[in-house]
Amino acid sequence: MSDERDVSTLSFEDALRELETIVSRLETGQEDLQTAIDLYARGDLLRAQCAARLDAAQARIEAIRVDAEGRASTQPFDAQ
């Protein structure tokens, strides 16, 4: 398995895809204990990477908001 450095280079989409694969494998209950632990650890790194990528995207959205008159302003992103 890849290590933490490899996870940091993944795009959001790639990290999410790998995380979904890991979740599917763990849900089957077919993996031996050590493999399941390793998969869980990798999944946690991938989850953190996805969260970091989403936080960065949210910050970019906040930074480029433009009001009706075309004036740029920074406003909190309201993800509802």
Image (tube, rainbow, N blue to C red):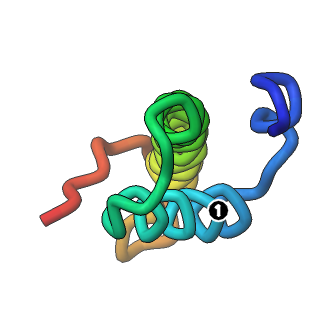
The quadrant of the image that shows the C terminus is: bottom left
Instruction: Give the residue at x 78% y 33%.
Output: 8
7 is higher (above) or lower (below) than 68: above
**Near-viewer residue (63 or 55):** 55
Indicate the position of residue 57 as horizontal and vertical percent values: 56, 51
Indicate the position of residue 21 as horizontal and vertical percent values: 56, 68
**Near-viewer residue (28 or 49):** 28
Is residue 59 at least partly visible in the picture? no
Indicate the position of residue 77 as horizontal and vertical percent values: 30, 51
Instruction: Give the residue at x 20% y 55%.
Output: 78
**Near-viewer residue (71 or 26):** 26
The quadrant of the image that shows the N terminus is: top right
20 is higher (above) or lower (below) than 8: below
Indicate the position of residue 61 as horizontal and vertical percent values: 50, 55
Residue 57 in the figure: left or right of residue 26: right
Badge 1, how many Cα within 10 Å: few under 14, some, many 20+? some
- Residue kind at label 1, given as amino acid type: Glu
Is residue 1 at least partly visible in the picture? yes
Callout count: 1
- Report the residue that reaches farthest toward the top: 4
74 is higher (above) or lower (below) than 45: below
Residue designated by label 1:
18
Residue 12 in the figure: left or right of residue 72: right
Residue 74 in the figure: left or right of residue 46: left
- Report the residue that reaches farthest toward the bottom: 68
Q: Circle 1 sits in a helix, a strand or a loop, which is it? A: helix
Q: Quadrant of residue 38?
A: top right
Instruction: Give the residue at x 43% y 62%.
Output: 30
76 is higher (above) or lower (below) than 22: above
